Amino acid sequence: MSDKRPVSNPLALAVLSLLYERPMHPYEMATTLREREKAESIKLRFGSLYSVIDRLEQEGLIRAGERIREGKRPERTVYHITEAGSVEMRDWLRELVSTPVKEYPQFEAALSLLPGLPPDEAVEMLELRGELLDGMIEQIDARHEQAVNYGIPALFMIESDYRKQMLECERAWIRQLIEQMVEESWADIELLEGIPTWRQMHAEHNGGDE
Amino acid sequence: MSDKRPVSNPLALAVLSLLYERPMHPYEMATTLREREKAESIKLRFGSLYSVIDRLEQEGLIRAGERIREGKRPERTVYHITEAGSVEMRDWLRELVSTPVKEYPQFEAALSLLPGLPPDEAVEMLELRGELLDGMIEQIDARHEQAVNYGIPALFMIESDYRKQMLECERAWIRQLIEQMVEESWADIELLEGIPTWRQMHAEHNGGDE
DNA sequence: CCGCGTATACTCGTCAGCGAATATACGGAA
DNA sequence: TTCCGTATATTCGCTGACGAGTATACGCGG
């Protein structure tokens, strides 16, 4: 994450958000985040929860309050957000919303190394990806439909609406790429290399070394 | 990264790709990757280069060859890819191309926590993002034009073409979201909450605690 | 031929991240 | 009453990532 935030783990932002709503103890945070399925859209590793909370406290963004105990359960520390914490949360959110950051989707990496695969295999894999994307899009649609039935407000579906849009976009792009590759229409565009050259390269390759 | 790969750092894949072309010593790998601007599309931290290479060697995916020295420079170890390495590289690439993985774009996280920002501020930030995206798209266009002039084949521009497509898609989605929010057209759709409720929530909030 | 800026080629220490383990408590069945 | 499965709540230790530092060598201007 764009470091310079006192605590850069996205889990920290989620924690601040929760405590902005109301004070909670750590385990309740984890439970609430799970209930709301925030882990769908934010990378949350609950193994890091306690250390993130400690650091937030050290930075003065949250503050430990009462230590309560229910029954014979181990006592649990309730945390509150501080004024500095509210400021940090809003500032962080504003930045995330307003400023595109460079991210490195694995697929983009794959594309930039695509010549490492023989072209026919590449096409095959792209086709597979297209189908898998179809499935993922359908799933989101199904969930949306369900949500509408339950009367869940659209505000709470923004993230997955966004994801759906991106998936559809990727799918369209891939389909187009496949077409181009199958037609080998690149041969016209390229001066140095075309699909035939690419294929030949792999045919010649003696499988590396050793 | 989807762990279970013997070395999961994407830098490792880049290294395998390079050695699949020809043997190299570490520093040359770094230089070549920089020349080809692979760092644009793959998350490469060259601080990890040597440890990644060590692990690749331990896993038998690459093999240290001659140690050459030019002039009085420290001697450099030339590495070769092994058969196992070629296999791993192709398998990894196939997986990356064919199988969408769950990634966590920061913007998606932001969207899922959007209610943490007052709605008018949210709109403002979204507008800013839209403009920044415009700028990024223009930049890619400029680079593409230049590349065409230099006669660089389209094959080498796939990654950034993909990125451009995604950026345009995001921009379109954002514009649409802004429109909806400004019209407050959500009020019709939502049963529990509308923009007015959202706004009120923030007006009431006493700034957290302490 | 001397000095210094830049390129070459690594090394190392720190630290966040996280999986997996731990330990206790509760509640219901038999 | 006792057992056991599940929920509660947290700790710990390893490991990979990476920034920042280091040290030598080359080349070129003066």
Image (cartoon, coloured by chain):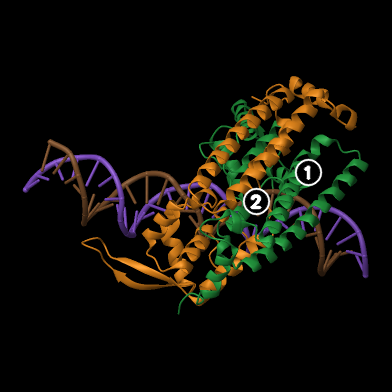
Chain colours: A green, B orange, C purple, D brown
Q: Is residue D25 left or right of residue B7?
A: left
* Residue B104, numbered label: none
Q: Which residue is mark 1?
A: A36
* Residue type at numbered disc 1: Arg
Q: Is residue B99 left or right of residue B80?
A: right
Q: Which residue is mark 2?
A: A45
Q: Which residue is at 72% across, 34% downward? A: B174
- Residue D3: name its quadrant: bottom right
Q: Nearer the viewer, residue B172 or B80?
A: B172
Letter of the chain that mark 1 sits on in the rendering: A
Q: Give the Cα separation between the discs numbered 1 and 2.
A: 15 Å
Q: Which residue is at 74% across, 49% downward? A: A167
Q: Nearer the viewer, residue B206 or A103?
A: A103
**Vertical position of residue A177 compared to residue A201: above or below:** above
Question: Which residue appears farthest toward the top when viewing the image?
Answer: B203
- Residue B108: name its quadrant: top right
Marks 1 & 2, CB-CB < 8 Å contact: no
Task: Tell me the quarter of the image containing the C terminus of chain A.
Answer: bottom left
Count neighbours of disc 1 (C-alpha within 10 A) and say few if under 14, some if 14 to 19, many if 20 or more: few
Percent across and percent down for residue A96 are 63, 35
Q: Secondary structure at mark 1?
A: loop
* Residue type at numbered disc 2: Arg
